[in-house]
Amino acid sequence: MTAVFSKVQDVLENYKTSVYEKDVEKFLSMYAPEMRIYDCWGNWEVKDLSLWKNNVAEWFNGLNEEGVLLKVDFHDLVVEEDISLAFVYCTVTFTARLAEGGEQLRQMSNRFTYGLKKVNESWFIAHEHSSLPISVETGKGIYNIE
C-alpha cells in the first residue's frame, strides 16, 4: 500500500510517528524515489532510496539495541507551498528515552530543510538537508537549541 500525504503536515507527522515506531518502510514512504539527502551523520550525501533505506535501518536497529524510543519535535516550523512544490525549514529535536521506564538519556537538535514535491496528489520529500551550527571556539557541532 502506498501512503498518501495530502498535506505537507501529513509528511511531518509521518516523520515523527515512523521514527518513534522505528518503522523503516513507513519512514521511507514519504521520500520520492529520486530524492537527494545532505545529512550531517554518516554519509555526507545520499542520492538513492535503497542507500537511504540502509542508513535508516541502521539508525532504527541501533535504537532497538539500546532499548530507546526517539521522540521527534519540530520547532520554528515554516512551510511555504504552492500547487506542486513546498519548502519547509525548522529545527528538529530528537529526545531519546528508555523504552522501559521512560528515563531521558539524551537530546539533540538539528536544523532541517525539506524540499517537497506533489506527485499524484501526494507530497513527497525530494530533498532533505540537515545541519548543525559549528562553534567557532571549539570547532564542534552545537547540538541543542539555546
Image (spheres, grey):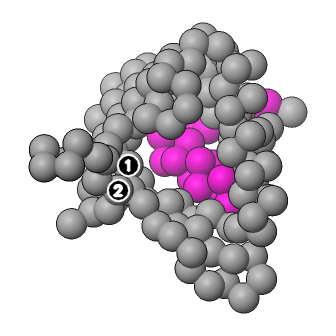
- The picture quadrant where one finds residue 124 is top right
Residue 45 in picture, x, y percent from top left: 50, 19
Along the horizontal axis of the image, is 60 left or right of 86? right
Label 1's element? strand
Main SS of residues in magenta: helix
- The picture quadrant where one finds residue 59 is top right
Which residue position is annotated with label 1? 110
**Contact (Cβ within 8 Å) of mark 2 with mark 1:** yes
Report whether residue 39 is seen.
yes
Residue 30 in picture, x, y percent from top left: 63, 33
Label 2's element? loop
Q: Quadrant of the C terminus?
A: bottom left
Mark closer to the chain start, 2 or 1: 1
- From the image, state whether disc 2 or disc 1 is nearer to you: 2
Q: Where are the magenta residues, as a range?
A: 2-21
Q: For the point 50% across and 36% down, which residue is it?
A: 41
Q: For the point 75% across and 64% down, which residue is it?
A: 66
Report the amino acid beneath label 1: Asn
Within the magenta stretch, is there residue 125? no
Residue 32 in picture, x, y percent from top left: 61, 20
Report the amino acid beneath label 2: Tyr
Number of residues whose C-alpha sits closer than 10 Å to that of mark 2, classed few (under 14), some (14–19) or many (20 or more): some
Q: For the point 79% across and 30% down, which residue is it?
A: 2
Task: Out of 88 and 23, give the one closest to the viewer.
Answer: 23
Within the magenta stretch, is there residue 20? yes
The mark found on residue 143 in the picture is 2
Q: For the point 62% across and 85% down, which residue is it?
A: 103
Please say if 66 is above or below 126.
below
Looking at the image, the residue that sits furthest to the bottom is 101
Q: Quadrant of the N terminus?
A: top right
Please say if 56 is above or below 127.
below
